Amino acid sequence: MKKVMIWFLLSCKRYVRKPSFLVILLLLPLGILAADRSQGHKEQEIKIAVSVQGGDGNELGRRLAESLVNRGRGVDAGMFLFYECRDEEQVKDEVASRRAECGYVITEGLREKLDSGKYRRSILVYSAPSTVAASLSTETVFAALMEIYDRDLLTAYVAEESLFDSLGAPGSRDREQSALEAGALYDKWLDNGSTFRFEYSFQGQEGAADLPGTQTQETVFPVRGMVAVYVFVTGLYGAVVLCGDEERGLFLPLSYGYRTPCRLASMAAPVAMAAVSGLLALWASRSLVGPVKEIVAMAVYCMAVTAVSWLLKVICRRPQVLCCIIPFFVIGSLLFCPVFIDAGRYLDVLDQVGKIFPPWYYLRWFG
């Protein structure tokens, strides 16, 4: 085991001494870091002011404001940061001073207006002429309102409509219990992801927003997908180098029992170095999910890449043949694995084809 480890370290040293390989090794993390630094340290959130008219009497308006403010925090945070103001005048001041890109005033009697169907101007919007935040954030406000009001509509429908008289008379204990159960089912099917809805998110951010009408503003470049392909291609390159070493008789001086382990160590060396480079790139792009999960996933992926590369080396035998098939695996990984787009969501056959390529499994671990 000690000899194998020494061979692995010597192989790493050998690759480090190759200027071209070292440049490729550092290019991805340094490029991502430079791109991130060039964006500066500007605030990512778009601030939006909210106020509620009618005080505690406007129960639905109060719940809507709390929902908007709370979804701007924690893992549900998107590009909009809602904060509450004391009244309509403060909302106007916040927008006029550009402390807020736009502002919403939830008028008094919101529930009554919605129940009657006369909901025009029930929520007022103030925005600066030069901003598009109002049109973008309206969907978020509407989605938050519907999450609350649709539940109330369902429970009221079950509690009052004659269609459900078999459950008991309106106002009876059994009927009210059925309405509560309907509300619980609404919460269940809304929260477990089974309800149809649109989601806006960019790949490559920890805790990306998963609520209607929200989106994130981290690095858009698909860093994780490129890292997966990068490590795989490096494994294939290591297999090509190994074929050349075998043709030159590099492993003949070793005893028979050490030849295969040292071959694997030689091929695993560039893969491990590419993995470290890839983790640095993920760190630079702020895409790390968690240290333990990232390291374990990358370690398993490196072993899989090494095994696949070894199998291809055994099948192809000659470095020239391996070099010829590398473009096939690169293009296939980029097209059929969820690097830029997840084609498998549209055609199941494309998802099945993607399983041929190792990056598919690594990306699905985080997808």
Image (cartoon, rainbow, N blue to C red):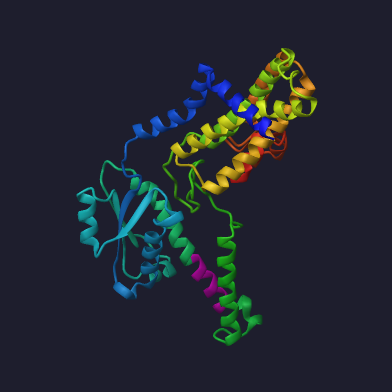
Where residue 252 sits in the image (x, y, percent)?
A: 76, 18
Number of labels in the image equals 0
Can you tell which quarter of the image residue 338 is in? top right
Q: Is residue 353 left or right of residue 168?
A: right
Displayed quadrant of residue 53: bottom left
Q: Residue at left 63%, top 81%?
A: 165
Q: Which residues are magenta?
A: 150-160
Residue at 41% across, 33% down: 33
Residue 219, how many percent across, how many down? 44, 37
In which quadrant is the N terminus drawn?
Answer: top right
Q: Main secondary structure of the magenta part?
A: helix
The spot of residue 241 in percent (x, y) is 66, 18
In-front residue for pair 110/246: 246
Residue 152 is one of the magenta-drawn residues:
yes
Q: Is residue 356 left or right of residue 48?
A: right
Image point (44%, 31%), residue name = 32
Q: Nearer the viewer, residue 333 or 238?
A: 238
- Above/below status of 50 relative to 14: below
Give above or below for 356 relative to 135.
Answer: above
* Horizontal arrangement in the rendering, residue 39 relative to residue 277 (left or right): left
Which residue sits at x=51%, y=22%? 22
Any part of residue 22 in sight: yes
From this viewpoint, is residue 367 visible? no
State the quadrant of the C terminus: top right
Is 331 placed above or below 114 here?
above
